[in-house]
Amino acid sequence: MITVPAGLRESSAQAFGEEGVKWCATLPDLVAEYSERWKLTLDLPERAEPWFGFCGIVVPVRTPSGEPAVLKISWPDDDTAHEHLALAAWAGNRAVRLLAADGPRRALLLERLDADRDLRSLPVDDAIRVLVDLLVGLAEHPAPAGIDTQEDLAARWIEQLPRRWREVSPPYPEAMLIRAVHIARESGPGSGSRLIHTDLHYENVLASQPESAATRGEWLAIDPKPVAGDPEFGVLPLLWNRLEELDPADPAADLRHRMRLAAEVGGLDLDLVRDWSIARLVETVIWDSEIGAGDGDHHPGWIVEALTGGS
């Protein structure tokens, strides 16, 4: 039996309330169920806890042939509904390889990458170059049927963001909301249909195993929140992480440097990068207020102000 990490119990309770607490309690049985179904052997050191993220657990296992792998089980919401579809479409090209999946129950068997090496090990500018190369490369694939579209998401924001803003009254000028709705209305229609990893941040890229690095590259993406759209929609995570490393003399200018670097490296439209980042940030401001998280760890309100303060 595995032990559910305290950090996962806390984040699940904060984000999903009592249902999150109940879900965490089911995880040991779910791990046992899928270990039996896929003939897996737990590969955890004695008394060690599984890895975990904000809304999922990752358990080191071995397949029947002895191959190192991980069993990942995620909270069953819209964000995790299509992860298996994206990974299947990428088929190990620039992303972790999917070995088996039960999509409706959010259970995935994945190849095991090097969990001790992610892009936090590189200087920020170098890491951004890797992230954008992956973002654009992954977007070479058309999105499979069933993936949420950027156009539909924008249409929902036009309708829902004003109501949600009024319900929670975030501590920011309403001009932020107005701009986000304008972006969704102007840029949403006609968005592309490429397969976009919308949560491609520094910790969601792990080093590949040495035996596959030569053919698949040194770095591979994990944990996609896929959308059918344009690559500019996926830049935000590299902006709002590692904020503590911004130049203290002028953090806003340094953040805008990250944005310009991403656009340049990826051949992206800088205005669209800025606009979609702002729209996504406003949605995050509202969601943070809805779950009582204040401004969150990513400080979305400040980032909106920084991105709108210059070019």
Image (cartoon, rainbow, N blue to C red):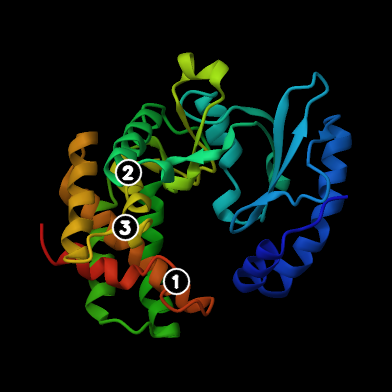
Residue 141 at what x, y percent from top left? 41, 27
Q: Which residue is mark 2?
A: 123
10 Å neighbourhood of mark 1: few (<14), some, or many (≥20)? Answer: some
Q: Are marks 1 and 3 in contact (CB under 8 Å)?
A: no
First in sequence: mark 1 or mark 2? 2
Q: Could you say whether the residue bearing mark 2 is in a helix, strand or loop?
A: loop
First in sequence: mark 1 or mark 3? 3
Q: Are marks 2 and 3 in contact (CB under 8 Å)?
A: no
Spatial CA distance of label 1 from label 2 is: 24 Å
Q: Residue at x 61, y 73 (%)?
A: 14
Residue 175 at what x, y percent from top left? 22, 77
Q: Which residue is mark 1?
A: 296
First in sequence: mark 2 or mark 3? 2
Q: Is residue 121 above or below residue 207?
A: below
Q: Is residue 162 above or below residue 133?
A: below
Amino acid type, label 1: Gly
Residue 204 at what x, y percent from top left? 49, 44
Left or right: 201 in relation to 276: right
Q: Residue furthest left?
A: 311
Residue 245 is labelled as: 3
Visible residue check, residue 170: yes
Visible residue check, residue 158: no
10 Å neighbourhood of mark 3: few (<14), some, or many (≥20)? Answer: few
Among the 4 quarters of the image, the one containing residue 43? top right
Marks 1, 2: nearer the viewer = 2
**For the C terminus, which image quadrant?**
bottom left
Task: Count the marks.
Answer: 3
